[in-house]
Amino acid sequence: MASEFKLAPSILSADFADLQSALTQCEKGGAQWIHVDVMDNQFVPNLTIGPPVVKSLRPLTEKYMDVHMMVIGPEKLVKPFAKAGADGITFHIEATEKPQEVIDLIRSTGKDVGLSLKPKTSVRDIEPYLDKIDLVLVMSVEPGLGGQEYIDGSTERVAEIKQLLTEKELRDKVQIEVDGGIKLHNAKEVIDAGADVLVAGSAVFGTEDPAKTIQDFYNLAN
């Protein structure tokens, strides 16, 4: 439900040799979600996490596992990630010619359905699917690499999507998540524009005390 603010630290920026420590920091800081960036080196220029990693993390945390698939042919990975323990599965509108089929497939696994769009993709491209999903993920950087700067104009896109959801009476049913370049200095404006969930990678795990940084994000939101 679109309501209380949530931070989703991205383990892409954590130490892959010690992901359990990253989960512990998220626990201490009070983050409700764990964001898992899945990249296939085709849809985006990077290769990252697959279902086995999610499966290995699942017993270590009760947090909501937020899987963001930046892959071509997302339908091939829906069931493997669902079986591995994802709570929500998000795919890109640009990655498939049959978005509705992917939505239906994710729904059939009992997981929450997310739909994402790149910075240059029109918000209108996702409009036909808003009443069929649980979450819109707004990319505020070009997907594929961590540590990028927040793209100007992304906040306005968040506000535009919030307005669309409000007009369609879906604001209480569809969450807005924002991913890319989120830092403590710009988080509040993005939340005020309509974001319910913020993804933060290097802004959390690149600090000396990730747990405190997570708490700082919540203090800003509140």
Image: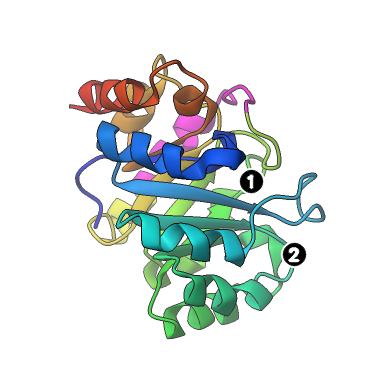
Residue type of the residue flagged with mark 2: Ile
For the point 44% across and 82% down, the residue is: 109
For the point 25% across and 28% down, the residue is: 218
Q: Which residue is mark 2?
A: 72
For the point 33% across and 53% down, the residue is: 175
Q: Position of residue 37 (x, y in %)?
A: 58, 49
Q: Is residue 157 magenta?
A: yes
Q: Is residue 37 above or below residue 213?
A: below
Residue 53 is left or right of residue 131, and the answer is right
* Label 2 residue SS: loop
Q: Residues within 10 Å of mark 2 (few under 14, many from 20)?
A: some
Q: Quadrant of residue 147?
A: top right
Q: Which residues are magenta?
A: 147-162
Q: Position of residue 145 (x, y in %)?
A: 69, 36
Visible residue check, residue 128: yes
Residue positioned most to the bottom? 108
Q: Which residue is mark 1?
A: 118
Cα distance between the residues tagged 2 and 1 = 14 Å
For the point 58% across and 82% down, the residue is: 101
Q: Is residue 96 magenta?
A: no
Q: Which mark is residue 76?
A: none
* Label 1 residue SS: loop
